[in-house]
Amino acid sequence: MYGLALLVSLPLVIVTGLLDYAAYGPQFGQALPSDVGWLRLPPFDWPTRPAWLFRLTQGLHVTLGIVLVPVVLAKLWSVTPKLFDWPPARSLAQVLERLSLLLLVGGILFQIATGLLNIQYAYLFGFDFYTAHYFGAWVFTAAFVVHVVLKLPRLVSALRSRSPRGELRAARAATRAEPADPDGLVAARPGPATETRRGALALVGGLSLLLGALTVGQSLDPLRRTALLLPRGRAPGGGPNGFPVNRAAAAAGVGEADTGRQWRLALRGGQRTATLDRDQLLSLPQHTAELPIACVEGWSTRQTWTGVRLRDLAALAGVPAPVSATVRSLERAGLFNQAVLASHQILDPDALLALRVNGADLSLDHGYPARVIVPALPGVHCTKWVNSIEFRARNA
Amino acid sequence: MRESTGGFRAWYGTGLRHLVLMVACFAVTGWIVLRLVGEPRAERMLLWFVGAAVVHDLLLFPVYATADAALRRLLGVDAHPGSGARVSALNHIRLPALAGGLLFLVYLPGILGQGGSTYLAATGQHRQPYLSRWLAITAALFLVSAVWYAIRISRRPCRSP
Ligand code: HEM
């Protein structure tokens, strides 16, 4: 039963994880880890529509990953007797299979542990998260696929052998252990049943629901405060800028000194450079769009952004049909102080250099004087405190 | 031909398909290991990978199995096999205990207030440890379970022999 639930849901976690990698734009060398050889999805352009695409995929990845924890533990609980099998190996095939199970079990626990620590900002592991979580995912995926191919026939026959409805209806006193199985998983001398099968499933399902209830709030604005135990259940103050921040200005080393009246935006296109101050930007045609911003850590929020369309800025720079653009931030250090946008991400009518949010100026923590917001683009690439944008034409 | 596959089975333990799958699985892992050997702190990754499985199997699993056995003994559950009529408190303790333990495990960094400086850099807020929230949620779960138990008992007052 738990096996079936995992068979259906784990592929979703794997695929949404790989989509996260694709959303970074690996074709510009800006996905992490940068060199993964052939271990990746086939290259494609991450779309800008639907605007909630990344919010959905990454929200699913993290929420599903958390909700599955009780199912994974229950599955491990149900197979643990095998672990203490004696003698440990009767044939070469069995030795190899046990090794592959170590990759399977170690893999899923490693992914869960690194993922959970990452979204809660506790980098206790001391190694690079991207490298570990990305390659860990492939070790796990290979072991998972092999495990499914080997065990699928057994799963089908186990589910066929007894009526699932009958088993679920049975009262506790009538709950009997399964008949002996070829893998020796069923206990030889089981204790008296203290729980019905229905009860055991309800327990695991209930625990999953509990985790889900305490997690979804980080991705749904009206429920934000229900994520009682997660960092993103807290809204930082009220007002138009009262939504969660990722990377505070102080941590980025950006202060009033760089963002005051002397701030200028440099627009480059080929040999040309145009320089604009904030008032000039505000006097250009303004566009307002309601767009979600979704962090790679799985949380997200939807806000109303106002600013200048990126395609208008491209035209101003003399590159009306850019193939790509590099956006740089005032932030000097930091992994995400610049990002490359693809052509369709610049030309989308809702792709903005935002100056205002919810009718007020951006706060410093949200990227004042100006930040990028592009539909379906991961939050880390919606560069804050923008300093310059360099548009590239086809032959540049 | 038959002869040789039979020989392979006897030597290997099962069919050729199994071996092909195993080789494929280890090829992917082997390729990744070769790629990661030069990586800074690769040995820590290995430690966490193997450690995750070991901690689960040799620490977590025995802990919850032992706790459960102790609880059963305390409530005398094993002494009344199949006594379906008696309302047992076992699951009413197991359930909130499991739930509280699970929440602790999953939201551990927040509950213990780990990683304060990374948290501040990312969110612009100071970390408030969620220990009291976790205790309150766990207490509420125990309370609901106890009330539910009381209702079950009061519903069958004169059932005992
Ligand atoms: C079977 C389990 C899992 C698999 C196979 C998996 C796979 C992946 C993959 C391939 C990525 C892309 C990494 C990259 O872009 O470098 C990813 C990203 C991520 N995963 Fe998982 N994951 C799993 C479980 C989890 C869990 C349980 C959580 C947390 C609760 C989690 C949190 C994350 C986060 C936060 C990222 C974004 C990293 C970033 O781009 O900054 N994952 N995952």
Image: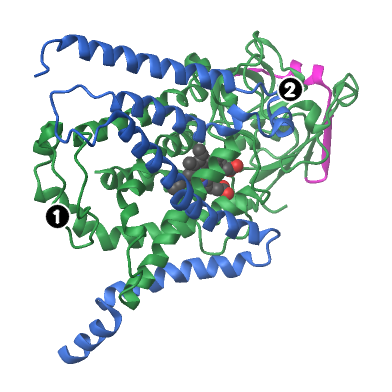
Indicate the chain on which mark 1 is placed: A
Residue type for callout 1: Ser
Q: Position of residue A104 (x, y in %)?
A: 41, 57
* Chain letter matching colour green: A
Horizontal side of A131 relative to A195 (left or right) equals: right
Residue designated by label 2: A365
Horizontal side of A150 relative to A113 (left or right) equals: left
Please name which of the two marks, 2 or 1, marks the residue nearer to the observer.
1
Placement of the N terminus of chain A among the 4 image quadrants: top left
Residue type for callout 2: Asp
Magenta extent: A270-288
Residue drawn at the location 60% of the way across and 28% of the way down = B110
Q: Secondary structure at mark 1?
A: helix
Give the quarter of the image for residue A317.
top right
Residue designated by label 1: A157
Q: Are marks 2 and 1 on the same chain?
A: yes
Q: Colour of chain B?
A: blue
Q: Position of residue A226 (x, y in %)?
A: 49, 17
Give the quarter of the image for residue A265.
top right
